[in-house]
Image (cartoon, rainbow, N blue to C red):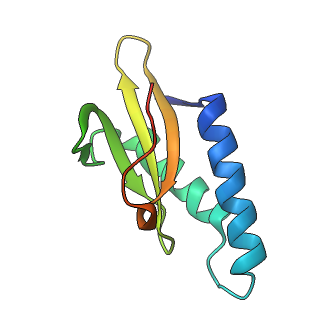
């Protein structure tokens, strides 16, 4: 399936990556690498991510080695996965989703 990133998710990912790079520069984990691996996994197995407990229309995928979670939905008719949010699990409640 093809993967698309909403403008909101793109901004959230950019902010998370910037914070990580500034504050966790010594970490062996790069957010960009974790994101790339997550997108590849979701594209290949879209149903593997657990459904989001607050809205079952969405699934989640944890970026390995980080507290960050991607929120996505699968549009089977369009054969597209939409990444609609990225959020730190440490922030408590999740992002507003479309």
Q: Is residue 36 left or right of residue 63?
A: right
Residue under the point 69% across and 81% down:
24
Q: Nearer the viewer, residue 42 or 26?
A: 26
Q: Please, is residue 50 above or below residue 10 in the view?
A: below
Q: Residue 2 at x, y = what percent?
A: 53, 28
Q: Quadrant of the C terminus?
A: top left
Q: Is residue 42 left or right of residue 8?
A: left
Residue under the point 57% across and 63% down:
34
As drawn, the residue found furthest toward the front would be: 92
Q: In which image quadrant can residue 58 be found? A: top left
Q: Residue 80 at x, y = what percent?
A: 47, 23
Q: Residue 70 at x, y = what percent?
A: 46, 49
Q: Nearer the viewer, residue 84 or 39?
A: 84
Tell me how many marks there are: 0
Residue under the point 52% across and 48% down:
86
Q: Please, is residue 69 above or below residue 72 in the view?
A: below
Q: Nearer the viewer, residue 2 or 92?
A: 92
Q: In which image quadrant can residue 72 be found? A: top left
Q: Residue 25 at x, y = what percent?
A: 75, 82
Q: Nearer the viewer, residue 51 or 15?
A: 15
Residue under the point 63% across and 46% down:
12
Q: Is residue 64 left or right of residue 75?
A: right
Q: Is residue 8 left or right of residue 74?
A: right
């Amino acid at each position: 399936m093809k993967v698309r990133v909403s403008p909101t998710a793109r901004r959230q990912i950019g902010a998370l990556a910037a914070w990580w790079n500034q504050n966790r520069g010594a970490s062996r984990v790069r957010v960009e690498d974790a994101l790339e691996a997550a997108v590849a996994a979701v594209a290949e197995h879209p149903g593997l991510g657990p459904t989001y407990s607050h809205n079952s229309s969405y699934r989640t995928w944890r970026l390995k080695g980080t507290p960050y979670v991607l929120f996505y939905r699968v549009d089977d008719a369009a054969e597209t996965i939409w990444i609609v949010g990225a959020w730190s699990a440490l922030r408590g409640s999740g992002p507003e989703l479309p």
